[in-house]
């Protein structure tokens, strides 16, 4: 540690920090940052990180080739590093959250211990905000006890969106839940034809603000042929199996519950499940968990992990009642990004041919600028022509005042004419 701090201090102070995409030569430095950031993990977690970095060393060339054309694994390792001289100061990894890539997710931010974490971390995040123009919203998930990370994210505009609680159901409790017979008469397997039903269920299960940030559509619940092949290869390599299903309500013709569980066939890692239940059908929680427990009985005995959010109080209440253990409490944060200058198309007024566009509105002669409108000019001309006319003998001149109206006639009186 002392040697690294000394090497950092020997760097020129005026040497700027460069943010660039991660390369193969950065993997050793990323592994060092990962070990420092997760030094407090259990030995099992450290072994998982080592296996992940070994896999990344082995398949980096293939992953880099996949990033050159559109495919489900295009952003499998979309990372940027902060470098000063030849010293790696930090790394950020991001990925699209939905299929339209309007919302992106910050997967992890790794920073060296001897640097200004607020400064380097802010530079990494702002580089992603400015370079990934299709992202309108950014989200991330952070542990509530990680005060340094919370301060960094709040400094860069992230705000609280939802709170997540992760639960663990022991293998003994799973055996007890598996003894019950789940009452799910309309349990169906999931296919691409059910994407609209799953999208409607996902929309109904979230509050409006979370639904707006996630910005999912029907495409997010479909799987392409390339995705099916990729998932099959991934399950074969990792020795896992994925089982999913949904509960159909025939009267409303809608999906009211959905589950997906990833089962470990080696018996090393715990099983991981995701649940989506319509708010009007919370009685499905015991039935779905019994179904998950029965599925897990065919695999090595391991615990089952699943999550609940703060807008799902029924799920948290049920998990507490059956004796599930809280293992982690996290916070989902979001931030909106507007790219006004980059997204707007610059139009030069000089390039527009106004005479060709407005040929019918060309003036016949050059207008004379004046301070009054043409209506006032017409009224003034009419008044001048009226003043020039001389009244005839038969015409009468009217004089008006506030208190009286006088009428003077130019003709002689009728009685005077008779006397003459």
Image (tube, rainbow, N blue to C red):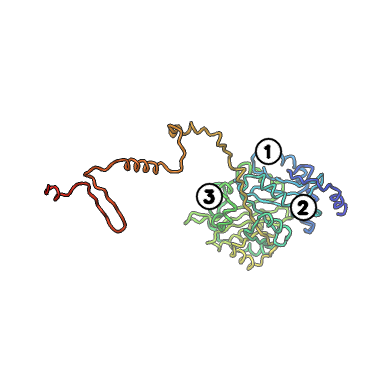
Question: Along the line of sight, which residue is nearer the eye, 120 or 312?
Answer: 120
Question: Along the line of sight, which residue is nearer the eye, 101 or 122?
Answer: 122
Q: CA distance from mark 1 to mark 3?
A: 31 Å
Q: CA distance from mark 1 to mark 2?
A: 28 Å
Residue 48 in picture, x, y percent from top left: 76, 53
Q: Which residue is mark 3?
A: 196
Residue 400 in picture, x, y percent from top left: 30, 53
The residue that appears at 53% across and 53% down in the rendered structure is 200
Q: CA distance from mark 3 to mark 2?
A: 42 Å
Q: Earlier in the sequence, mark 1 or mark 2?
A: 1
The residue that appears at 67% across and 56% down in the rendered structure is 141
Residue 316 visible in image: yes
Q: Badge 1: few (under 14), some or many (20 or more) residues near its Cα, within 10 Å?
A: few
Q: Is residue 199 left or right of residue 267?
A: left
Q: Which residue is mark 2?
A: 111
Q: Earlier in the sequence, mark 1 or mark 3?
A: 1
Residue 69 in picture, x, y percent from top left: 66, 38
Residue 27 visible in image: no
Residue 373 in picture, x, y percent from top left: 42, 43
Q: Which residue is mark 1?
A: 68
Q: Is residue 327 left or right of residue 387?
A: right
């Amino acid at each position: 540690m002392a040697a690294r701090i000394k090497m950092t201090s020997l760097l020129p102070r005026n040497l700027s920090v460069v943010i660039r995409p991660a390369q193969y030569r950065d993997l050793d430095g990323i592994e060092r940052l990962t070990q420092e950031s997760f030094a407090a993990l259990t030995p099992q977690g450290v072994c998982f990180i080592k296996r992940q970095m070994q896999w990344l060393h082995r398949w980096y060339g293939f992953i880099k080739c996949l990033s050159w054309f559109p495919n489900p694994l295009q952003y499998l390792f979309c990372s940027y590093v902060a470098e000063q001289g030849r010293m790696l100061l930090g790394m950020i990894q991001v990925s699209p959250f939905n299929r339209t890539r309007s919302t992106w997710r910050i997967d992890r931010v790794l920073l060296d211990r001897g640097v200004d974490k607020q400064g380097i971390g802010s530079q990494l995040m702002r580089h992603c905000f400015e370079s990934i123009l299709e992202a309108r919203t950014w989200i991330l998930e952070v542990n509530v006890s990680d005060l340094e990370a919370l301060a960094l994210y709040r400094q860069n505009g992230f705000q609280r969106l939802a709170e997540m609680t992760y639960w663990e159901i022991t293998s003994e409790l799973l055996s007890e839940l598996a003894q019950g017979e789940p009452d799910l008469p309309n349990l169906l397997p999931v296919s691409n034809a059910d994407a609209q039903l799953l999208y409607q269920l996902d929309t109904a299960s979230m509050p409006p603000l979370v639904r707006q940030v996630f910005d999912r559509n029907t495409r997010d619940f479909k799987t392409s042929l390339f995705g099916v092949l990729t998932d099959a290869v991934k399950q074969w390599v990792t020795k896992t199996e994925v089982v999913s299903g949904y509960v159909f309500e025939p009267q409303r013709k809608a999906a009211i519950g959905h589950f997906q569980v990833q089962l470990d066939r080696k018996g090393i890692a715990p099983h991981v499940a995701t649940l989506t239940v319509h708010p009007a059908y919370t009685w499905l929680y015991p039935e779905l968990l019994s179904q998950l427990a029965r599925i897990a009985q065919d695999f090595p005995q391991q615990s089952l992990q699943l999550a609940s959010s703060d807008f799902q109080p029924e799920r948290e209440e049920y998990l507490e009642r059956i004796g599930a253990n809280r293992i982690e409490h996290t916070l989902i944060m979001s931030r909106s990004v507007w790219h006004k200058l980059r997204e707007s198309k610059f139009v030069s007024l000089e390039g527009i041919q106004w005479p060709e566009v407005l040929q019918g509105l060309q003036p016949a002669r050059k207008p004379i600028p004046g301070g009054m409108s043409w209506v006032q000019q017409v009224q003034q001309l009419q008044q001048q022509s009226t003043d020039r006319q001389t009244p005839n003998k038969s015409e009468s001149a009217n004089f008006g005042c506030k208190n009286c109206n006088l009428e003077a006639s130019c003709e002689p009186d009728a009685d005077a004419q008779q006397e003459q």
